[in-house]
Image (cartoon, helix red, strand yellow):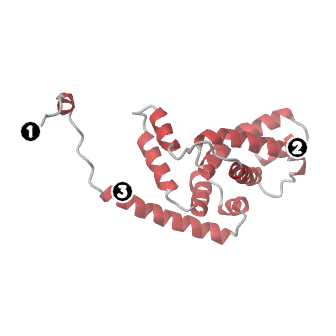
């Protein structure tokens, strides 16, 4: 990927396409976790690539192209937060997760696990979630995650360890809760009982 970025810097259009194609999904996943808004993730990913391609002439390959791009993505998300804070909100979108869940087809393998993972990740503090997503879900080495997060490698390791511990605790709590009995179809088809006065 770094070789494609360097070739793209030299003006190779095929290298630009390969660079974008190789990293687009990673950028979308990363910004989706940072901004907690799947609808904004695609726009932020596009903004990230526009910024990256505009400053590709400054990329020298001292770090990997992936960590360079993720740092740009992080700044794009921060800038979008700043921009949003400066504008008045017309409505709350706190229930975006419910809307997304309702729009998804049910019965797909792994769907419920994915929703559960999103809920667990949302419970983590921002810094721990970012470190966990970068290293455990996106597969970045700790050194690259530290570059993206602009913090020491030891801090990233600590955040990931704490995130894991929190996730294990949350998962243990969730699994220890009693599961409600499903309502049978026959019971749901009966009209509700009317109480006599």
Q: Which mark is residue 197?
A: 1
Tell me which numbered mark, 2 or 1, is placed earlier along the sequence: 2
Pick whichever, 113 or 194, lies toward us.
194
Q: Which mark is residue 113?
A: none
Above or below for 71 versus 165: above
Is disc 3 placed on a helix, strand or loop? helix
Tell me which numbered mark, 2 or 3, is placed earlier along the sequence: 2
Would residue 153 be seen by someone viewing this image from the given angle?
yes
Q: CA distance from mark 2 to mark 3?
A: 49 Å
Image position, residue 112 (x, y; %): 41, 42
Is disc 2 placed on a helix, strand or loop? helix
Q: CA distance from mark 2 to mark 1?
A: 81 Å
Which residue shows up at 81% across the image and 37% down it?
A: 16
Residue most toward the front?
197
CB contact under 8 Å: marks 1 and 3: no
Q: CA distance from mark 1 to mark 3?
A: 41 Å
Tell me which numbered mark, 1 or 3, is placed earlier along the sequence: 3
Image position, residue 172 (x, y; %): 36, 61
Q: Is residue 116 left or right of residue 79?
A: left
């Amino acid at each position: 990927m770094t070789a494609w970025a360097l070739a793209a810097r030299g003006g190779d259009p095929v290298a630009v396409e390969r660079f974008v194609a190789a990293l687009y999904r990673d950028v979308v996943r990363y910004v989706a976790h940072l901004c907690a808004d799947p609808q904004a993730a695609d726009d932020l990913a596009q903004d990230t690539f526009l910024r990256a391609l505009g400053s590709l002439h400054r990329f020298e390959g001292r770090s990997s192209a992936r960590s360079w791009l993720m740092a740009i993505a992080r700044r794009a998300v921060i800038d979008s937060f700043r921009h949003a804070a400066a504008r008045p909100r017309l409505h709350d979108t706190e229930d975006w997760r419910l809307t997304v869940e309702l729009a998804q087809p049910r019965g797909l393998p792994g769907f419920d696990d994915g929703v559960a993972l999103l809920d667990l990740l949302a419970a983590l503090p921002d810094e721990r979630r970012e470190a966990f997503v970068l290293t455990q879900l996106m597969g970045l080495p700790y050194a690259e995650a530290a570059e993206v997060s602009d913090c020491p490698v030891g801090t990233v390791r600590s955040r990931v360890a704490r995130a894991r511990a929190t996730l294990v605790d949350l998962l243990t709590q969730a699994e220890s809760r009693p599961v409600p009995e499903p309502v049978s179809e026959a019971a749901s088809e009966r009209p509700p009982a009317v109480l006599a006065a």
